[in-house]
Amino acid sequence: MNYKQLVAEIAPHVTELFPWDVREAQQNGVEYLLLDIRCPSEFQVMHIDGSLNVPRGILEMAADFGYEESEPDLINARNKHILVICRSGNRSILACHTLQLLDFKHVYSLKTGLRGWHEYEQPLIFANGNPVPAETADNYFIPQISREQLGKG
């Protein structure tokens, strides 16, 4: 099994929301914990204002008390709406699945990820809180895959 196959196998068990679904729900009073599971270096480049960065690699420990990685805002959101965010919407599927296994009740993956959020013309901010210009975000979301990363056929 490869990465795409793993995501495809888990995806039917995860609720995905498009950016416009999220905005509509927010306008109707739904409050989400915005959980960005990208690496800290990705989060520092740009993110949705108000989001909490808990990298996927420490998610299980962050979701439980007793660890240096414990994140009380996440732990206390076990029965709240959690929108899980990554760059394209694939890692967030895996993270949602993990949170469901850990008995979180209302977890949703942001379908299309930050890329789709930006394409839907929703704001992103830099680590310093300043807004990200559209052109900067456009360039960020252009895939940068090397020949070696493509592999063979």
Image (tube, rainbow, N blue to C red):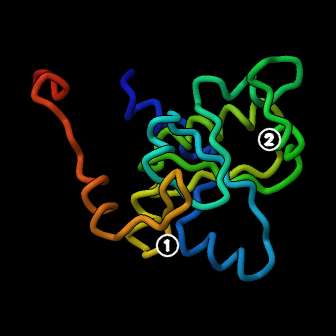
Please name the amino acid that badge 2 sits on.
Leu
- How would you rate the neighbour count of disc 2 (Cα within 10 Å): few for under 14, some for 14-19, many for 20 or more? many
In this rendered view, identify the residue nearer to me: 81 or 41. 41
Sequence order check, earlier mark of 1 and 2: 2
Which residue appears at 65% of the width and 79% of the height? 24
Q: Residues within 10 Å of mark 1 (few under 14, many from 20)?
A: some
Question: In the picture, residue 132 is in which quadrant?
Answer: bottom left
Cα separation, mark 1 vs mark 2, equals 24 Å
- On the image, the x and y values in percent for residue 19 come to 53, 68
Say whether residue 117 is left or right of residue 69: left
Q: Which residue is mark 1?
A: 122
**In this view of the protein, which residue sits in the foreground, 137 or 13?**
137
Pointers 1 and 2 in contact (CB under 8 A)? no
Task: Pick the quarter of the image with the C terminus.
Answer: top left
Q: Which mark is residue 74?
A: 2
Element at label 1: loop
The residue under the point 78% across, 52% down is: 106
Name the residue at 74% across, 54% down. Answer: 33
Under circle 2, the secondary element is: helix
